[in-house]
Image (cartoon, grey):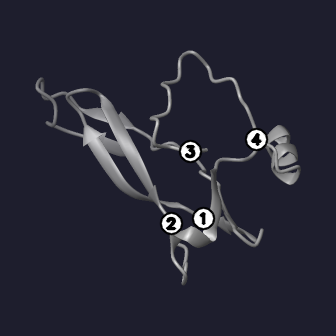
Amino acid sequence: MVRLINLTPHGIALQFDLPKVEVPMTVIRLDGYRESLSPVIDTLTLEPDKGIFSLVWRTHLPIPFGPKEIKTLLIGKPTPGWERAYMMNKPFITFRSPNLPALPNNIKL
């Protein structure tokens, strides 16, 4: 439980529980080897005047030959459709929810 006292303009106390969120991550190397990562919460940013907080997860992965040896980084659990497309070496196309923001042009999935 997190309890914030005298950190808002009105001085009211705020309290909340941190969510129990798992963020599974998998790295697929160029040789096809998959490695599961276990991210942990690293940073909690509080913005009590806005009534929000943000969490940042951190993990580590030794990559002796540099980032070019990583083919894919999966964040979250892949769908069966994604797995099938990956195994067939085909692109996976998903229809994004209209409520989600578009990805920046420099991010490749």
Label 2, label 3: how far apart the Cα atoms are: 21 Å
Q: Secondary structure at mark 2?
A: loop
Amino acid at the residue labelled 2: Thr
Q: Amino acid at mark 4?
A: Pro
Q: Quadrant of the C terminus?
A: top right
Q: Which residue is mark 3?
A: 108
Q: Secondary structure at mark 4?
A: loop
Residue 91: which disc? 4
User: What separation in Å lies between label 4 and label 3 (alpha carbons)?
Assistant: 12 Å
Q: Is residue 103 left or right of residue 37?
A: left
User: Which residue in the protein does label 1 denote?
Assistant: 38
The residue located at (54%, 84%) in the rendering is: 64
- Disc 1 to disc 3, C-alpha distance: 23 Å
Q: CA distance from mark 4 to mark 2?
A: 27 Å
Q: Earlier along the polypeptide chain: callout 4 or callout 2?
A: 2
The crowd level at tag 3 (other Cα within 10 Å; few <14, some 14-19, many 20+) is few
Specify whether 7 is left or right of 21. Answer: left
